[in-house]
Image: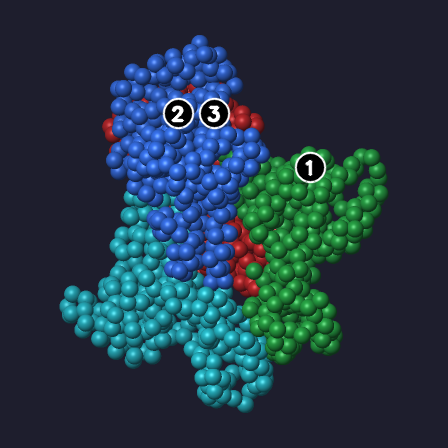
Chain colours: A red, B green, C cyan, D blue
């Protein structure tokens, strides 16, 4: 399949730092008729790692994406790079996992309907039937896995099969109140996005708003991160905060926090969908 | 001593909640010729505690502050209240404890010179000689306690004697790199203000900027709190944050954090000096 | 009709400042068995005007709201006060005016469904049919006034009749792309809430995002205000901002601005619905 | 003079956009032994202009800065570029113009003493003697031009001569209460940095805090911009804001605004000193 002339091609790459990287990589693109629209790079001077994102357009390309990848392979090998090349026109297929809270799902579906996300929402998975009407309103498949009827391992096996069947690339946990097993998580490395309703690493675990209320903080936050085996420890993608005062009761924290959760998760999804995130150990490089 | 006609009188009070409190307290003030300029109240509905701050002016008062306090005593006893009455014209005497970093001290002294704080800075105490020139520039006594020459207990005993001698009401730890003993702390309950260079309760203890850098957070913060026996656990007065990105190295976090520390500590001092803070267990009520 | 024991009674009052106001007003409430839950007051020292909001509960009241108002009348007259007394249980009836943009309406209806607003959304009015499906989804009457078929004066006359018929107290302009006539505006003084998509007074009039883009500002804003005869000049209720950079194109400003508009309008509606706003000439006092 | 091996070389360039720009420019650097440390580029898709900032290190360079510039000239001519090459080790020489307010000067001098700015503060110019002690404290020349003794044209002629004599590259107006003539301004194009105490374009001209107070805004701001012939109309470098409420009197706006002014001006100076700003008509591209 040939590349669509209107699409952008996006390279995300990290490798050990050395002189001449930008020039060699941009030279590769230039030699194949690419017009660079956007270039971001970063060097982690601590462990001397190089990160780059380049977006380019191709007015007339004799190369398909496959051919482009094959052509880039020798350079990538030489650099010892972790990399991927994506077309902006080929949308990331996402599944949204939810429980009973609707605010994050509502926000994602509405933004998606506005064309804000370069994604296909192929599937909504839940352990509760509550949000099916919302899925129906937007015409998206809704699969209910009632977790009390089967073992957790069995449920996850069925979920993974379903994700496979739907060709899902990325899973979004939109206030999904279940903890995924390490087995599940390792199937989607840096491809499961969670929203935690606190300013991590403050208030890990359950009931963070109650913890915040009892500690008497003057600011609450929300954190979106990739899920790893260690709960609430994955690389942070985005955070935001809002002020509170002594006047705010627990219910007010929950209300104000809902707005944060929606906004922070939406930004994380957009960054991910536009291939703006590179993982750097426990951290992320986000090329906004 | 009679009250100065231009001053405000300020009542800070907390007691178990019950009907009619505002009316009775404001009635007391009204009956003594007070014109209420500002009233803030708050009820913690969880443990049913009532908090109030009232500022009033007195055009002609036959009462001294002592007489006013005596007159208020029966009502306070009946209500089971913790309370104090202050004159805005009588400035809080403060001592600033510093080590080597100058930014917080610089900020406090400059704001004080602008007339932003209703305080007297009577004394600067340090375990290093570095900031003496700054103290001299502003004409403030600087006492050096070299901590390696004496035991910590001896140093603190001398410091407490000095604070006594200077009539100090409140101690500000402006990036003071020593931990005060419980004995010292209990002498100034809710009257020692610290600035911690993280968004508490994230990153307690040492090197919070390094902790934040290594965790890969997208926002850093600073927290001003009253010092209690439990390190970094005292009631939070004020917090603020600033965004960081992957581009910010540890040195950038420290640089950006300095600005936060200055601003947050300055706000906490102002709230304290204007008698705007009531402690509510591990939390504060701040009537801004 | 007797007052519901679970409701709060709310007094909003402004009058020329003088000594003893708080005491007399709280005394009035106390004498009628009221337990004050929340009291905010403010004195504009420039023109010596006093503003107060008091919320109280009544465990057993022999008085109806009418009787309470009648009882308060002599004091209000003596003080030369503008005032109203409301029950929290009696929801403000609102009409939402929209054109084609759905984001503000979506946000209001969703928040309303979450129970965030103490309002009844009785009616949606539009000059376009586009948002009828959204109104239907939430089961709210949708009235279409096609402005090209009648004169503007005729349309407004019909709209006013409809508002009357529905018993509407407050009108919300949720990105309504029509300018209301002075005749319409004076029928709802301080009861028409607009959202303007700029940081007023910057970028009044049309296309504020384009104006902001062309001026090269680094921050964009949104402003919610009461509508007066002077376009974009009414008393400001709430504002907020978001950072932009040179990377943001006009479309990004519009996208980011949508989030601001939603949040700012929602906060303004909540303040209004909870009777937290007093108008002070061209300004507002908002007791958050 | 050979380049210092520890320095970074920085290229700032803008030109009409066309394919292959990044590759050709980075190739030029690479061919001369440069190791790119940081690259930022931006395309204004409206008028198809390309902007780039590249910072690189040179381990062993046979070229002086002059030779490097000469070598780059042919490419620059071909591209129709506006450009400059700078060494990070060669500090920008700045003059600070002040009147009576000390907060901005204080902030700049303190930050400079902390090593935050890659600048030499060679000179302070004022129309008042008030801030001479502060200049003395930091050991910086202070020149007083009393504007009532000579015509404005004469004063400016003397000031320009002084700037010439001190080898000044950039002028910072740190709350300087005089308006510079077009003649003066055109001598330092995009090299005069001003701080305006409002969120431009709101509240241009005099007394912006009073204007803001009277309009009843809920947020105030500060704006740093390059000075052009049109007052308050120059390209904006940086802005920031702070919330205010009805409780804030004019004096509070001034106090809160001081903090904004200091912070915003400091950021603008840092961006300028690190060669991070390109002017794009009435706008700026700031590569943070």
Badge 2 element: helix
- Rate crowding at label 2 as few (under 14), some (14 to 19) or many (20 or more) other CA atoms within 10 Å: few
Badge 1 element: helix
Give the spatial CA distance, label 1 vs label 3. 30 Å
Depth check: give the residue in front, C44 or B63.
Answer: B63
> Can you see residue D198?
yes
> Can you see residue B244?
no
Q: Could you say where residue D43 lies in the image, as x and y percent from the top left? A: 32, 33
Q: Could you say where residue C198 lies in the image, as x and y percent from the top left? A: 34, 54
Q: Chain for mark 3?
A: D
Name the residue: 49% across, 39% down: D129
In the displayed image of the protein, which residue is found farthest to the front?
A: D149
Q: Relative to A56, say whether C236 is above or below.
A: below
| Picture quarter with the C terminus of chain A | top left
Front label number (1 vs 3): 1
Name the residue: 42% across, 41% down: D176
Q: Could you say where residue A207 lies in the image, as x and y percent from the top left? A: 60, 57
Reading the image, the residue beneath label 2 is D164
Reading the image, the residue beneath label 3 is D91
Q: Dots 1 and 2: beta carbons under 8 Å?
A: no
Reading the image, the residue beneath label 1 is B132
Residue C217 horizontal side relative to residue D257, left or right: left
């Amino acid at each position: 399949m040939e590349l669509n002339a209107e699409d952008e091609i996006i390279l995300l790459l990290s490798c050990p730092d050395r002189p001449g990287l930008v020039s060699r990589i941009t030279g590769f693109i230039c030699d194949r008729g690419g017009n660079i629209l956007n270039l971001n790079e970063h060097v982690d001077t601590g462990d001397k790692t190089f990160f780059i994102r380049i977006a380019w357009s191709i007015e007339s390309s004799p190369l398909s994406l496959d051919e482009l990848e094959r052509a880039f392979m020798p350079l990538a090998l030489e650099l010892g790079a972790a990399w991927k090349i994506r077309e902006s026109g080929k949308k990331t297929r996402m599944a949204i996992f939810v429980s009973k809270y609707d605010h994050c799902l509502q926000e994602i579906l509405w933004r998606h309907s506005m064309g804000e996300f370069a994604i296909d929402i192929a599937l909504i998975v839940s352990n509760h039937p509550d949000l099916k009407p919302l899925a129906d309103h937007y015409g998206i498949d809704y699969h209910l896995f009632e977790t009390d009827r089967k073992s957790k391992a069995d449920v996850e096996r069925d979920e993974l099969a379903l994700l496979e069947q739907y060709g899902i690339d990325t899973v979004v946990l939109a206030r999904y109140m279940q903890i995924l097993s390490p087995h599940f998580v390792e199937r989607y490395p840096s491809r499961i996005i969670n929203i935690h309703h606190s300013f991590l690493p403050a208030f890990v675990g359950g009931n963070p708003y109650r913890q915040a209320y009892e500690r008497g903080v003057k600011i609450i936050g929300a954190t979106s991160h990739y899920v790893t085996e260690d709960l609430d420890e994955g690389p942070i993608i985005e955070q935001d905060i809002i002020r509170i005062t002594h006047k705010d009761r627990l219910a007010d924290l929950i209300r104000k926090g809902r707005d944060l959760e929606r906004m922070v998760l939406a930004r994380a999804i957009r960054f991910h969908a536009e291939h703006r995130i590179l993982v750097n150990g426990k951290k992320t490089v986000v090329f906004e």
